[in-house]
Image (cartoon, rainbow, N blue to C red):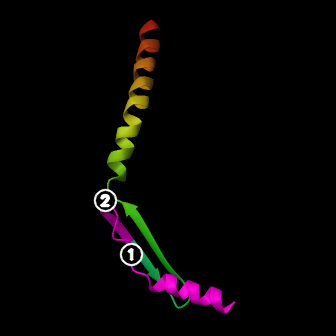
Amino acid sequence: MNQRKDTYRAALQRGPDTTAPRPAKVAQLHTRYVRVTIELDAALPRDLLRWMESPVSAIVRAGAAVLQRL
């Protein structure tokens, strides 16, 4: 049990990784017993738009073709 507590405390004392390739938005929550760090990738919205662009455009083209036939 003590080893687990020591490992947990050592992990809390560790600093953030410096090998992050892109800047991230960081939100931290500190209480007496819990320390939570949430990192959000700043490029996520741009990546989502890039990934969703072709499926959405394909759906729009298919819908336009169906509406033209009606």
The stretch drawn in magenta includes residue 4 = yes
Look at the picture and state if 67 lies above or below 24: above
Give the residue displayed 40% in from the left and 39% down from the top.
51
Give the residue displayed 32% in from the left and 47% down from the top.
46
Give the residue displayed 37% in from the left and 70% down from the top.
26
The stretch drawn in magenta includes residue 28 = no
Crowding at mark 1 (Cα within 10 Å: few <14, some 14-19, many 20+): few
Q: Which mark is residue 41?
A: none
Residue lying farthest to the left in this orientation: 23
Count every numbered label the image shows and give the total: 2
Give the magenta range.
1-26
Q: Where does the image place residue 20, in percent across and percent down from the top left?
A: 34, 64
Look at the picture and state if 27 lies above or below 49: below
Residue lying farthest to the right in this orientation: 1
Q: Where does the image place residue 32, in percent across and percent down from the top left?
A: 53, 91
Look at the picture and state if 50 lies above or below 25: above
Crowding at mark 2 (Cα within 10 Å: few <14, some 14-19, many 20+): few
> What SS does tag 2 mark?
loop
Q: Nearer the viewer, residue 18 or 27?
A: 18
Q: Which mark is residue 22?
A: 2
